[in-house]
Image (tube, coloured by chain):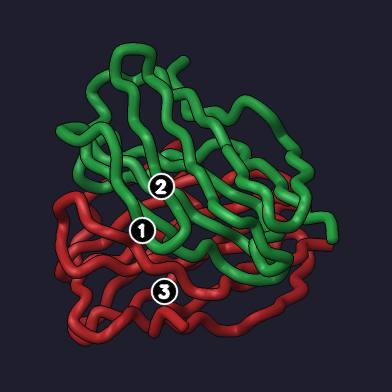
Amino acid sequence: ETGVTQSPTHLIKTRGQQVTLRCSSQSGHNTVSWYQQALGQGPQFIFQYYREEENGRGNFPPRFSGLQFPNYSSELNVNALELDDSALYLCASRPGQGNTEAFFGQGTRLTVV
Amino acid sequence: GESVGLHLPTLSVQEGDNSIINCAYSNSASDYFIWYKQESGKGPQFIIDIRSNMDKRQGQRVTVLLNKTVKHLSLQIAATQPGDSAVYFCAENRGDYKLSFGAGTTVTVRA
């Protein structure tokens, strides 16, 4: 167990809807990153939050947004869902911004129909 | 474009044998590398990491080798066990905020 928990574990949404995924980071970790993992692929970086500020973003459209709270937990929001958004969404926490091990949660499996 | 990739998508290993999983990277500026193991239905699990100022690092039953000259990374698993069956990813850190993953190698351990 990594101490990173995500909710929900599974979710089914309809195209065009909005979804919020949640992540509770490991105690003492102030950096949270979100990744999208399509079936059979490696995780793709979406964005990272450090002390409640977004400080890095991958090649994802603006309808992917996030938040980090004072307790360092985080949310990933996706608007106007598309079928291609179906994937495993992973949250990873780190103790800082430097090159350190990232601990992943078990992920949220999102299916868009 | 620059990417992290693995040489083989699948690897079948006899239980008790040693496994070697390879990874090629193209960004010479990357300075930190991690190997992850992902079992079905779970998130990636940290195995071992290595910084660019090192050539080799050992853990429990695992060894990571880094060859910066040819931009190659490998993970060696000693005495492979059935519980080692999983998808293995190498990841590189290209900045202070992003891990870039390859597509993964599926390791199957034969009894």
**What label sits on residue A45 in the rendered view?**
none
**Quadrant in which the C terminus of chain B appears:** bottom right
- Asked if both marks, 3 and 1, belong to the same chain, the answer given is no
Q: Is residue B111 left or right of residue A68?
A: right
The chain under label 3 reads A
Q: Within 10 Å of the Cα at label 2, are there few (<14), some (14-19), or many (20+) other Cα atoms?
A: some
Residue A108 position, x and y percent, is 61, 72
Label 1 belongs to which residue? B59
Say whether marks 2 and 1 touch (CB < 8 Å): yes
Q: CA distance from mark 3 to mark 1?
A: 34 Å
Q: Nearer the viewer, residue B111 or A102?
A: B111
- Note whether A32 is above or below B51 in the view shown: below
Residue B90 position, x and y percent, is 48, 42
Residue at the image point whose x is 49% and y is 65% from the top: B45
Label 3 belongs to which residue? A75
The chain under label 2 reads B
Q: Is residue A110 visible?
A: no
**What label sits on residue B63 in the rendered view?**
2
- Output the letter for the chain in green: B
- State which quadrant residue A7 falls in: bottom right
Q: Nearer the viewer, residue B69 or A13?
A: B69
- State which quadrant residue B31 falls in: top left
Q: CA distance from mark 2 to mark 1?
A: 6 Å
Q: Nearer the viewer, residue A4 or A109?
A: A4
Q: Amino acid at mark 3?
A: Glu
Q: Is residue A67 left or right of residue B12?
A: left
Label 1's element?
A: loop
Residue at the image point whose x is 15% and y is 63% from the top: A96
